[in-house]
Image: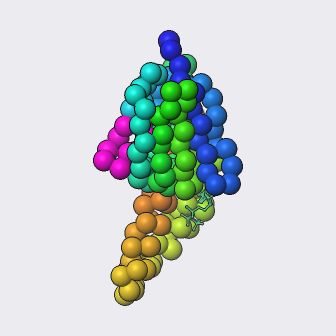
Amino acid sequence: MSILRLEIVTAEHMVYSDDVNVVVAPGIEGELAILPHHAPLLTALQPGELRIRKDGEEIYLAISGGFLEVRPDKVIVLADAAERAEEIDVVRAEEAKRRAEERLKTHVPEMDLAQGEATLRRSLIRLKVAERRRKKRL
Ligand code: ATP
């Protein structure tokens, strides 16, 4: 099976770097499947789940938006934040969710509302990705 090189980086560190078979990313206009020999592409990502298929195995990451570039030699994801399922701190994500819900319940200016919604979304994505890992182990 042909492979493609994938690098997922944030401003702080390299989150993932390996040869994979398929990448499914949360594109700004919907899910985007990248297979080997995909045409060059640059697109924005929305917060969501990024799935990797490698040797018949699925690897899940939580992504908080960013960009995806398909180059002739590799695919680069430059993410605002990215965590592999096993790196997600579930207690922290639940706390962030609770705080965001609390914030959205109280009367806050529009700016806070948008921020609360974005935080809530990130926490829900992290919980979903962490749950995928839990299910895999059952
Ligand atoms: P929190 O309020 O818990 O910081 P947040 O959604 O505001 O959540 P971000 O701004 O998206 O956090 O991320 C800040 C940094 O913390 C990033 O490096 C991100 O990867 C990491 N991070 C955030 N939440 C978690 C989590 N639940 N588990 C592991 N890493 C996390």
- Which residue is at the far right? 13
Q: Height in image: 51 above or below 79? A: above
From the top left corner, tell me how far across and down residue 111 is, in percent. 40, 80
Name the residue located 68 percent from the left edge and 54 percent from the top edge: 12
Specify the quarter for ligand 1: bottom right
Q: Quadrant of the C terminus?
A: top right
Residue 35 among magenta residues = no
Dividing the picture into quarters, in which one does residue 6 lie? top right
Q: Is residue 43 left or right of residue 2?
A: left
Name the residue located 55 percent from the left edge and 30 percent from the top edge: 74
Q: Nearer the viewer, residue 121 or 23?
A: 23
Q: Is residue 91 left or right of residue 132?
A: right
Q: Height in image: 77 above or below 57? A: below
Q: Nearer the viewer, residue 124 or 74?
A: 74
Instruction: State the predominant SS element of the stretch in magenta.
Output: strand
Which segment did they paint magenta? 24-32
From the top left corner, tell me how far across and down residue 99 is, in percent. 51, 74
- Which residue is at the far top? 1
From the top left corner, tell me how far across and down residue 71 is, in percent. 50, 32
Q: Height in image: 1 above or below 71? A: above
Q: Height in image: 114 above or below 19? A: below
Q: Is residue 125 visible?
A: no
